[in-house]
Image: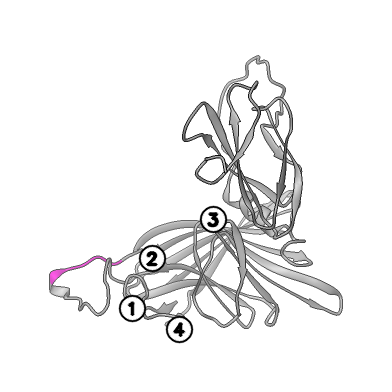
């Protein structure tokens, strides 16, 4: 937990680096010990606040998943979850909207999205470590320690140099109960070889489950709705077009490499070919009348 003396938007802050305390007094519970999955629950306390974290490790993968529930009642403080690593001189890469960016490991507060990765090498080769998350957008990293910014409780809608008058009353942000998830993922090679961007997408998009009774139907037990032949190309949008009777399909290249392949979907009778430059975003209109061919458009769905 770190001091947060600034306003709502952190205008005067480049780094939260004044430690005010750490959660402790941990209690542990073993929840599952089966051959497919192990799960432990850890509860810690600080002041009037508590954190309950469920750690899950599956036999089928290397990701350590955590579901966290925070009851936060501290004022003018920032809560960060710290993950120390041995990669104190590696390459630091953040995810950003439709792309990625490398930054120095200087401990400053930086924006990011669904993943952050440190990759390096030793005498055995290249390797790395990634932190995935489903809802947080700030991180600071120094000397190999990743600190995910979870909450900060400054005054609501306060802008320096405005002076707060406690007699008038004001709200503090982020107090109360919060839930979020993150995952720790070691990998071989750099973040591209570790398929971190794709894994972060999967982590953030949990499958939807619909309960029903058993009944006869025309579909087979498994059916693929849409697929892309390139492992580093993602379908990020499938929606009704802004105009006309068509669907808008949007692709993005994730790894900063050239890509070529096909999209296969039940919405089209034939595979749809594509070519993408590094980090390119491409939109394709799929007419609902399958007699009309798909066509590429720009981001506002107009023909170039």
In the displayed structure image, the side of residue 302 where residue 292 appears, left or right? right
Residue at the spot of label 1? 6
CA gap between label 1 and label 3 equals 26 Å
For the residue pair 197 and 79, the one nearer the viewer reads as 197
Give the percent coordinates (x, y) of residue 239: 53, 36
> Where is 142 relative to 253, above or below?
below
Residue ID at (40%, 80%):
13
Most frequent secondary structure within the magenta stretch = loop
Residue situated in front as seen by the camera: 46 or 155: 155
Q: Hey, which residue is sitting farthest bottom in the picture?
A: 18
- Label 1 neighbourhood size at 10 Å, few (<14), some (14-19), many (20+)? some
Using the image, tell me which numbered label, if any, was put on residue 195.
none
Q: CA distance from mark 1 to mark 2?
A: 18 Å
Which numbered disc, 2 or 3, marks the residue closer to the eye? 3
Residue shown at 38%/65% (left/top)?
A: 72
Q: Earlier in the sequence, mark 1 or mark 3?
A: 1
Q: Residue furthest front?
A: 304
Q: Mark 4 — residue?
A: 19
Mark toward the start of the polypeptide (4 vs 3): 4
Q: CA distance from mark 2 to mark 3?
A: 19 Å
């Amino acid at each position: 937990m770190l001091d947060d003396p600034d306003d709502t938007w952190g205008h005067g802050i480049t780094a939260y680096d004044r430690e005010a305390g750490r959660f402790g007094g941990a209690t542990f519970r073993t929840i599952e010990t089966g051959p497919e999955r192990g799960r432990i629950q850890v509860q810690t306390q600080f002041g009037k606040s508590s954190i309950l974290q469920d750690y899950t490790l599956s036999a089928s993968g290397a990701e350590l998943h955590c579901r966290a529930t925070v009851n936060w009642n501290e004022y003018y403080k920032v809560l960060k979850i710290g993950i120390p690593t041995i990669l104190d001189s590696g390459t630091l890469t953040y995810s950003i909207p439709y792309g990625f960016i490398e930054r120095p490991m200087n401990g400053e507060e930086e924006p990011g999205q669904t993943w952050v990765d440190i990759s390096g090498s030793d005498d055995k080769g290249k390797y790395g470590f990634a932190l995935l998350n489903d809802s947080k957008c700030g991180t600071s990293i120094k000397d190999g320690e990743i600190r995910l910014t979870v909450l900060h409780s400054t005054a609501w809608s306060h802008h320096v140099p405005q002076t707060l008058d406690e007699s008038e009353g004001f709200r503090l942000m982020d107090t109360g109960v919060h839930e979020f998830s993150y995952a720790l993922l070691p990998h071989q090679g750099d973040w591209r070889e570790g398929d971190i961007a794709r894994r972060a997408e999967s982590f953030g998009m949990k499958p939807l489950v619909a309960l029903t009774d058993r009944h006869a139907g025309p579909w087979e037990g498994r059916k693929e709705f849409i697929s892309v032949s390139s492992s580093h190309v993602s379908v990020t949008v499938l929606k009704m077009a802004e105009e006309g009777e068509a669907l808008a399909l949007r692709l993005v290249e994730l790894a900063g490499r050239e890509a070529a392949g096909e999209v296969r979907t039940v919405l089209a009778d034939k595979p749809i070919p594509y070519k993408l430059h590094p980090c390119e975003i491409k939109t394709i209109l799929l007419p609902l009348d399958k007699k009309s061919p798909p066509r590429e458009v720009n981001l506002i769905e107009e023909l170039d």
